[in-house]
Amino acid sequence: MSDEIKKIDETLETPNEPEVKKEKKKLSKKAKKIIIIVVSVVVFLLVAAVVAGVCVLNSYCKTKDYTVVATTDDVTLVAHRGMRSVAPENTTASFTEAGKHGYWGAECDVYRTKDGVWVISHDRHTYRMMDKSAFVEKKTYDELMAMKVDNGVNIDKYKDLKMCSLEDYLKICQKYKMTPVIELKGKNNTEHYNEIADLVNQYKIDVVYISFQLENLKAMRNLDTSSKMYYLVQKISEKDIEDARSILDCGIDFNGNKEANFKNDILKKCRDQGLDLGAWTINDPEVMKKLEDNGVTLITTDSIEYKK
């Protein structure tokens, strides 16, 4: 009797080996399926992200088709990155075209090269506009001059177009009596703003400084107490009004295509606080008229021009 009980106990204590192997196999298959599913999802997400990124980059780099519209309104028009609707943006060609078309001002974006030359480029990287890829601030002026502009409207007309220096831009503005509207980019190089101020003084020309960075405007105001300034914002807030008022003779330059900027009397609040208003980037004459009716005095545009 005791031997039989012992056998039964042993049977209960020791699982059937084939059954155990079956269970392990099942678990192994299940684990493999889970791993395959997880890896597939991760790969899919990575591919989707890469494809989406390429599409966005392609869209950003693609040359836009502009419809140039003439206005009879007596408005203060600023050519956005020069007249980029007829020549590659931020180049001597686009600034010259802006001058020829009689724009009040021409807007540009500035960066400082590795060897201390201020040049004009909207992006920190040359990929979109030049035939070689590099970070503007990590290259010397000569290295950037070895590149060519290979993107933009009517690029075929400009075979040997180079990156424009701030000095060349100022010369063009002076020649056509345009007001330079200089966007101070990024959050760095403020310690070198004296170089910009000195260059502007050499040309004895009134300028307007704009920036999304309040600290940039404050740094430039410490060097230049007379030039007009505008604080760039997407959507105006009460805090933006307060910030703009903290700087001498500083207005607000906002995204005029955002409907939110026409709500809650925010534009009236700006005017009541004595702030001049500018709007960007306006390519629709109807939107421009709406902005004028709301007290906006400075219109930055790609494609609206004065009627000759």
Image (spheres, rainbow, N blue to C red):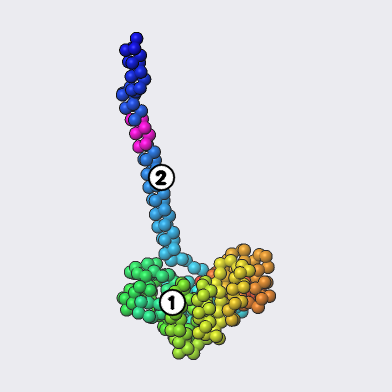
166 versus 267 height, above or below:
below
The stretch in magenta equals 25-32
Q: Where residue 219 appears, x then y in whole percent?
A: 50, 79
The N terminus lies in quadrant: top left
Q: Residue at x 31, y 24 (%)?
A: 17
Q: Residue at x 44, y 61 (%)?
A: 59
Res. 73 in view: no
Q: Tally the numbered discs.
A: 2
Frontmost of labels 2 and 1 is 1
Q: Are marks 2 and 1 in contact (CB under 8 Å)?
A: no
Q: Where residue 264 appears, x then y in whole percent?
A: 67, 65
Res. 66 in view: yes
Q: Nearer the viewer, residue 131 or 266?
A: 266
Q: Residues within 10 Å of mark 1 (few under 14, many from 20)?
A: some
For disc 1, the marked residue is: 189
Question: Circle 1 — which element?
Answer: loop
Where residue 41 is drawn, which disc sits there? 2
Q: Is residue 95 magenta?
A: no
Where residue 64 is drawn, which disc sits there? none
Q: Nearer the viewer, residue 303 or 247?
A: 247
Which secondary structure type mostly characterizes the magenta part of the structure? helix
Q: Where residue 102 appears, x then y in whole percent?
A: 52, 81
Under mark 1, the amino acid is: Asn
Question: Circle 2 — which element?
Answer: helix
Q: Nearer the viewer, residue 87 or 256?
A: 256
Under mark 2, the amino acid is: Val
Residue 26's quadrant in the figure? top left
Mark 2 vs mark 1, CA separation in Å: 43 Å
The C terminus lies in quadrant: bottom right
Q: Residue at x 38, y 73 (%)?
A: 137
Residue 247's quadrant in the figure? bottom right
Q: Residue at x 51, y 68 (%)?
A: 67
